[in-house]
Image (cartoon, rainbow, N blue to C red):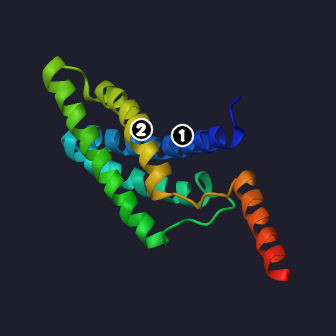
Amino acid sequence: MIKRKPVKVFLKAQLSAFSGGVTDYGMMILLTEKLGIHFTISILISGTIGGIVNFCINRYWAFKDQSAYLISPRMQFIRFFGVVLGSITLKSTGSYLLNQSFDLDYRIGRLLIDSMVSYGFNYPLMKLWVFKTELKKSKKSLANQNEKLLNDIQTNAF
Protein backbone atom coordinates (compact mmCIF):
# COMPACT_ATOMS: atom_id res chain seq x y z
CA MET A 1 0.00 0.00 0.00
CA ILE A 2 1.30 3.44 -0.93
CA LYS A 3 1.49 5.91 1.94
CA ARG A 4 -0.16 9.23 1.17
CA LYS A 5 2.25 11.58 2.90
CA PRO A 6 5.38 10.69 0.87
CA VAL A 7 3.36 10.91 -2.35
CA LYS A 8 1.93 14.26 -1.28
CA VAL A 9 5.41 15.61 -0.47
CA PHE A 10 6.72 14.33 -3.81
CA LEU A 11 3.87 15.97 -5.74
CA LYS A 12 4.27 19.25 -3.86
CA ALA A 13 8.02 19.19 -4.54
CA GLN A 14 7.34 18.55 -8.23
CA LEU A 15 4.92 21.48 -8.36
CA SER A 16 7.54 23.64 -6.66
CA ALA A 17 10.19 22.43 -9.10
CA PHE A 18 7.80 23.13 -11.97
CA SER A 19 7.28 26.71 -10.73
CA GLY A 20 11.01 27.28 -10.41
CA GLY A 21 11.53 25.49 -13.73
CA VAL A 22 9.04 27.67 -15.61
CA THR A 23 10.78 30.74 -14.22
CA ASP A 24 14.17 29.27 -15.13
CA TYR A 25 13.19 28.12 -18.63
CA GLY A 26 11.35 31.35 -19.46
CA MET A 27 14.31 33.46 -18.34
CA MET A 28 16.68 31.26 -20.37
CA ILE A 29 14.62 31.80 -23.53
CA LEU A 30 14.37 35.55 -22.85
CA LEU A 31 18.09 35.94 -22.19
CA THR A 32 19.11 33.79 -25.17
CA GLU A 33 16.54 34.76 -27.79
CA LYS A 34 15.94 38.42 -26.94
CA LEU A 35 19.23 39.51 -25.39
CA GLY A 36 21.54 37.27 -27.45
CA ILE A 37 23.35 35.71 -24.49
CA HIS A 38 24.83 32.24 -25.20
CA PHE A 39 22.50 29.57 -23.86
CA THR A 40 25.06 28.11 -21.44
CA ILE A 41 25.39 31.51 -19.73
CA SER A 42 21.62 32.03 -19.87
CA ILE A 43 21.18 28.71 -18.07
CA LEU A 44 23.49 29.88 -15.28
CA ILE A 45 21.60 33.14 -14.79
CA SER A 46 18.10 31.74 -15.19
CA GLY A 47 18.94 28.73 -13.02
CA THR A 48 19.90 31.02 -10.17
CA ILE A 49 16.64 32.96 -10.39
CA GLY A 50 14.57 29.79 -10.75
CA GLY A 51 16.47 28.29 -7.82
CA ILE A 52 15.50 31.16 -5.52
CA VAL A 53 11.84 30.72 -6.48
CA ASN A 54 12.12 26.97 -5.88
CA PHE A 55 13.84 27.40 -2.49
CA CYS A 56 11.11 29.66 -1.16
CA ILE A 57 8.31 27.36 -2.27
CA ASN A 58 10.12 24.24 -0.98
CA ARG A 59 10.95 25.72 2.41
CA TYR A 60 7.57 27.22 3.19
CA TRP A 61 5.27 24.74 1.49
CA ALA A 62 6.53 21.59 -0.22
CA PHE A 63 8.71 20.06 2.51
CA LYS A 64 7.11 21.82 5.47
CA ASP A 65 5.30 19.52 7.87
CA GLN A 66 4.59 19.21 11.57
CA SER A 67 8.19 18.21 12.32
CA ALA A 68 10.92 20.74 12.83
CA TYR A 69 13.68 21.09 10.28
CA LEU A 70 16.96 19.65 11.51
CA ILE A 71 19.01 22.64 10.32
CA SER A 72 18.60 26.41 10.33
CA PRO A 73 17.17 28.35 7.37
CA ARG A 74 20.65 29.74 6.68
CA MET A 75 22.19 26.26 6.52
CA GLN A 76 19.28 25.09 4.37
CA PHE A 77 19.98 27.91 1.94
CA ILE A 78 23.69 27.06 1.85
CA ARG A 79 22.91 23.41 1.14
CA PHE A 80 20.23 24.41 -1.36
CA PHE A 81 22.72 26.68 -3.11
CA GLY A 82 25.14 23.75 -3.39
CA VAL A 83 22.45 21.56 -4.92
CA VAL A 84 21.44 24.35 -7.31
CA LEU A 85 25.06 24.83 -8.39
CA GLY A 86 25.31 21.11 -9.09
CA SER A 87 21.98 21.16 -10.89
CA ILE A 88 22.90 24.17 -13.02
CA THR A 89 26.24 22.59 -13.89
CA LEU A 90 24.56 19.33 -14.92
CA LYS A 91 21.90 21.17 -16.95
CA SER A 92 24.32 23.51 -18.69
CA THR A 93 26.87 20.79 -19.45
CA GLY A 94 24.26 18.25 -20.51
CA SER A 95 22.47 20.73 -22.76
CA TYR A 96 25.77 21.77 -24.34
CA LEU A 97 26.85 18.16 -24.94
CA LEU A 98 23.53 17.23 -26.53
CA ASN A 99 23.72 20.32 -28.73
CA GLN A 100 27.31 19.70 -29.80
CA SER A 101 27.18 15.90 -30.08
CA PHE A 102 23.78 15.45 -31.71
CA ASP A 103 23.08 18.95 -33.06
CA LEU A 104 19.97 18.91 -30.86
CA ASP A 105 18.26 22.27 -30.37
CA TYR A 106 19.29 23.62 -26.95
CA ARG A 107 15.65 24.07 -25.89
CA ILE A 108 14.82 20.40 -26.46
CA GLY A 109 18.09 19.22 -24.96
CA ARG A 110 17.45 21.35 -21.91
CA LEU A 111 14.02 19.76 -21.37
CA LEU A 112 15.52 16.26 -21.62
CA ILE A 113 18.37 17.04 -19.25
CA ASP A 114 16.05 18.88 -16.82
CA SER A 115 13.84 15.84 -16.34
CA MET A 116 16.82 13.61 -15.54
CA VAL A 117 18.41 16.13 -13.19
CA SER A 118 15.10 16.89 -11.45
CA TYR A 119 14.22 13.30 -10.54
CA GLY A 120 17.68 11.82 -10.16
CA PHE A 121 19.57 14.66 -8.50
CA ASN A 122 17.44 17.54 -7.18
CA TYR A 123 14.52 15.76 -5.49
CA PRO A 124 16.56 13.20 -3.52
CA LEU A 125 18.99 15.85 -2.27
CA MET A 126 16.21 18.30 -1.38
CA LYS A 127 14.22 15.71 0.55
CA LEU A 128 17.05 13.87 2.29
CA TRP A 129 19.64 16.60 2.81
CA VAL A 130 18.41 20.19 2.41
CA PHE A 131 14.90 20.03 3.91
CA LYS A 132 15.33 17.01 6.18
CA THR A 133 12.97 16.97 9.14
CA GLU A 134 12.99 15.11 12.41
CA LEU A 135 11.82 11.57 12.14
CA LYS A 136 8.75 10.84 14.18
CA LYS A 137 9.15 7.96 16.55
CA SER A 138 7.25 4.89 15.54
CA LYS A 139 4.41 3.54 17.67
CA LYS A 140 6.45 0.41 18.36
CA SER A 141 9.40 2.51 19.57
CA LEU A 142 7.10 4.53 21.85
CA ALA A 143 5.51 1.36 23.18
CA ASN A 144 8.97 -0.05 23.99
CA GLN A 145 9.93 3.16 25.76
CA ASN A 146 6.68 3.16 27.76
CA GLU A 147 7.20 -0.49 28.75
CA LYS A 148 10.77 0.24 29.88
CA LEU A 149 9.59 3.25 31.87
CA LEU A 150 6.87 1.18 33.60
CA ASN A 151 9.41 -1.51 34.42
CA ASP A 152 11.77 1.09 35.87
CA ILE A 153 8.96 2.57 37.98
CA GLN A 154 7.90 -0.86 39.27
CA THR A 155 11.49 -1.83 40.05
CA ASN A 156 12.20 1.39 41.92
CA ALA A 157 8.81 1.45 43.72
CA PHE A 158 9.52 -1.68 45.72
Asked if disc 2 and disc 1 are in contact, CB closer than 8 Å, the reply is: yes
Which secondary structure, mark 1? helix
Screen quadrant of the N terminus: top right
Which secondary structure, mark 2? helix
Residue at label 2?
A: 118
Question: Could you classify mark 1 by the number of other residues whose Cα lies within 10 Å: few (under 14), some (14-19), or many (20 or more)?
Answer: some
Q: Residue at x 32, y 42 (%)?
A: 28
Q: Nearer the viewer, residue 5 or 49?
A: 5
Residue type marked 1: Gln
> Residue 144: x and y, percent?
73, 58
> Residue 156: x and y, percent?
79, 81
Q: Residue at x 69, y 37 (%)?
A: 3
Q: Please tell me how many numbered marks the rendered image carries.
A: 2
Q: Is residue 146 left or right of residue 97?
A: right
Residue 151 quadrant: bottom right
> Residue 13: x and y, percent?
55, 45
Q: Residue furthest bottom?
A: 157
Q: Residue at x 43, y 58 (%)?
A: 52
Q: Residue furthest front?
A: 158
Residue at label 1?
A: 14
Q: Nearer the viewer, residue 25 or 152?
A: 152
Screen quadrant of the C terminus: bottom right
> Residue 54: x and y, percent?
48, 52
Residue 33 lies, with reference to residue 56, above or below; the image says above
Residue 46 lies, with reference to residue 133, above or below; the image says above
Q: Nearer the viewer, residue 76 or 49?
A: 76
Q: Is residue 104 left or right of residue 137?
A: left
Residue 40 lies, with reference to residue 95, above or below; the image says below
